[in-house]
Amino acid sequence: MIRYVGTRLGQGLLTVFLTVSTVFVLIRLAPGDPAVAYAGPLATNEQLAAVREQFGLDDPLPQQYLLFLQQLFTGNLGLSYSFQASALDVVLERLPYTLTLATSAILLAAVVSVPLGVWMSRRTDTRSETGVNVVAIAGQSMPDFWTGILLLSAFAVVIPIFPASGFATWGGLVLPTITVAILQVALISRLVRREMASAFAAPYLTVARSRGVSERVLTWRYAMGNSAIPVFTALGTRFAAMLNGVVVVEVVFGWPGVGSLIVRALETRDYPLIQATVLVTSLLAVGVQLLIDLAYPLLDPRVRLGKASAA
Amino acid sequence: MTTTTTPSSTGDRPSAVTPRLRARSEAHRRASAARAKMWVGAICALVVVLPILLAQVLPLPDPDAQDLGDRLAAPLSGGHLFGTDQLGRDLLSRVLHGGQVSLAIGVLAVLVSGAIGVVLGSVAGFYGRWVDTIVSRLLEAQMSLPLLMMLLLVVALFGPSIPVITFVIAIAQWPEVARLTRSLVLVEREKPYVAAARTLGLRKVVVLLRHVVPNVLKQATLVVLLLLAQAVLLESALSFLGAGPQRPFATWGRIISDGQDYVTTAWWMVTLPGLFIVLLVVGVNLLGDALRDRPRRSRASRLRSLLGRGGTDRLDRDAKGARA
């Protein structure tokens, strides 16, 4: 168990390290000069050179990378150019907002999609189920920025129930959460349906039914028990993906999270900020993935960590 | 048990199975649900795709022709079916011409990602060992990457030209094809015919290319439609964030992003292009879903009854190939 966690942690950290290094190289290959973005279009060449020297951008790339590694292991990722503050602090300040949005969206998605999927699996291919299925497919086909703008104009502008942007009150959380959750509900309810339907078709279920086990127990204990792992994995993976910033929705709602931060950082070529964001979010994503795997034995006692993990 | 011979509603054979019972059977229900999905999907997709393909032929104003006297005209007014935008450009024309770009990117991206995915997936599944390790690690690494962020980064790096965006979307999508192909090949390579072909002296590459890949390709291509739907959504998200094809192309994402500022005064600028995307993506998704869910045999047997003669295996295969 401890060995398993150790190995997984090592692999995860390696992935994070490679990701961060790739990003380091990529952003420096990219056209666009952070000095220009920082000093403005009217800056003279001398000013630009001064800015580059101040940020260490005129050093050779390997030297910059060594400095970056040093910073990485001391936990100080340098100053953000545009915020003039520690890049890591800027990211950590934004992180709770993304965490709040991701958590509420995944909770809403789970609460809606699991019962919905179970209902669908109980009556596969009837007319009403096909109808719901089509609606779910539609939900999965809507661009989130579009639903976001529509919800925003309907419930913040035309009927002003919720604030239009930012996170001043808890009401501000409602519309972004719904926007994010629509896609998740569509995807996960269809997954639940698929998993449950195949569980219902399995022979052990017929045997249990013939023994007189009630439909309710059949559904929730037998079929659900055997569908729990894939459903839980999907929820967890989706959550991990959201921690990388729900970029589009955050931009639409002016949500002060990591996603809108990265868009701004990319625009201004704020190298330290981009690196800090990538580091924090990929660390979190790896951590969540590990937690998901650690939860498997709780959901299914047959799972032994470390042995089946290769499968 | 005594069998009551019901009056023959099902021909001359006595049977307790009435047509009504049969209609409620699971296989029948599944088939008809799949058929319904397929029709709805095909209609939705065609409603969008046909006008897009015909955009040059249809009597539409130029998508970039500005008419500042006719700004933000409502739909159905002044000969503008979808109204006009903030510069007086005809919205329908912009949506249709933008659709050509979005569709082209989507189709190309799916072709590229399909090719990469099938090659890497089948090689990994067939050869196993270190090849498999490399490909599987790549798949995992990509899963843990912040996807949209990386896409934005790469577009910032190489510039938002159409080839770059196509490539970026393809890179985002190949894991799905690769994973599916790999798992199919893993099953396929254990089958006796592979061993037989090897015993006959065929080299591994030949077995893979001539026998294994053709056998899994049909199933692997079923995801293509679902990928196309995703590609269109991804492209519109990129354009919305300003990382899509640049002007003069009017892509769907940017039309919506432009309309965002006018959403209270000109609802159509956001709503109508969005509906177009939804209709297309729903249609493609439904089609893909129906093709995947469809009972295998029905396609061939329906064709056979259509042709009015017994089908051979050959016919089955051709029929499947033609529809897939």
Image (cartoon, coloured by chain):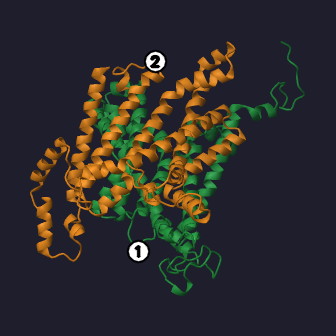
Q: Are marks 1 and 2 on the same chain?
A: no
SS type, badge 1: loop
Residue at 55 percent across and 48 percent down: it is A182
Q: Is residue A173 left or right of residue A9?
A: right
Chain in green colour: B
Q: Percent position (x, y) of residue A282?
A: 31, 43
Q: Percent position (x, y) of residue B223?
A: 48, 44
Q: Can you see residue B114?
A: no
SS type, badge 2: loop
Q: Residue A157 is drawn in which quadrant? A: bottom right
**Front-most of residues A179 and A19:** A179
Q: Is residue B234 left or right of residue B266?
A: left
Tell me the colour chain A is drawn in: orange
Label 2: chain letter = A
Q: Amino acid at mark 2?
A: Pro
Q: Residue beneath label 2, please? A: A301
A66, above or below B18, in the image:
below
Q: Percent position (x, y) of residue A129?
A: 67, 40
A192, above or below B233, in the image:
above
Q: Amino acid at mark 1?
A: Pro
Q: Residue beneath label 1, please? A: B248
